[in-house]
Image (cartoon, rainbow, N blue to C red):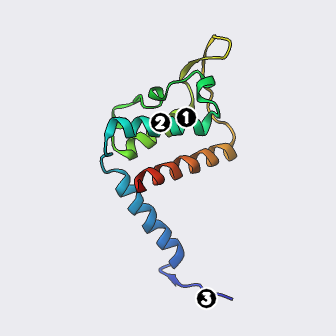
Amino acid sequence: MPISHVVLGISVSEAARKQVSCEIERKLRQPLRRRALAVRAFAEAALRLRFSEPAESGMQPAQLLACRRSEDVGDDLWHVYNRCREHLLRGGLSRRSITGRLTRTRAIGSIQQDVALNGQLWDLAVQRLAA
């Protein structure tokens, strides 16, 4: 049986996870290299996570990059990640359906889908950070 180390009520592994998460968040706030291309590439990849066929979704990656409030302005990976995440999870973006009708995207109502998409977006951001 492994020995669990606890310091001040927090296990060592939990503290390490929090430290790594804080370090990743700090790096996400650094400006993206080749901004325009990197931002668009992230939005395209994020759109593919939600819609298997982005062309059939009737949406453009640029729609995910629109700011809903002044706090969303910024081209670092952290701001781009948060804008894409909010648009994909909350919905409300205009798009054309396959039949050509103007509709709005729906919010994700399932907690399981929400958590899965959130995790995939986070992994995508970490991958972009490593590149």
Q: Name the residue under label 3.
A: 3
Quarter-of-image position of residue 88: top right
The image quadrant where one finds the N terminus is bottom right
Residue 76 location in percent, x, y?
Answer: 34, 44
Instruction: Say which residue appears at 67% left-offset and 43% top-offset.
Output: 113
Q: State which mark lies toward you, 3 or 1.
A: 1
Is the C-beta separation of discs 1 and 2 under 8 Å?
yes
Q: What element carries label 2?
A: helix
Local packing at callout 2 (Cα closer than 10 Å; few below 14, some 14-19, many 20+) is: many
Residue 128 shown left or right of residue 9 in the figure: left
Residue holding disc 1: 47
Element class at badge 1: helix
User: Which of the two labelled residues, at mark 3 and mark 2, occupies the earlier sequence position?
Assistant: 3
Q: Is residue 16 above or below residue 116?
A: below
Report the side of 19 relative to 101 (left or right): left
Say which amino acid is labelled 3. Ile
Quick one: 120 or 3, which is closer to the camera? Answer: 120
Label 3 – label 2 distance at C-alpha: 44 Å
Residue under the point 38% across and 52% down: 28
The amino acid pointed to by label 1 is: Leu
Q: Which is in the foreground here, disc 3 or disc 2?
A: 2
Above-or-below relation of 115 to 98 = below
Numbered badge on residue 38: none
Q: Name the residue under label 2.
A: 43
Hey, what amino acid is under mark 2?
Answer: Ala
Of pointers 3 and 1, the one earlier in the residue sequence? 3
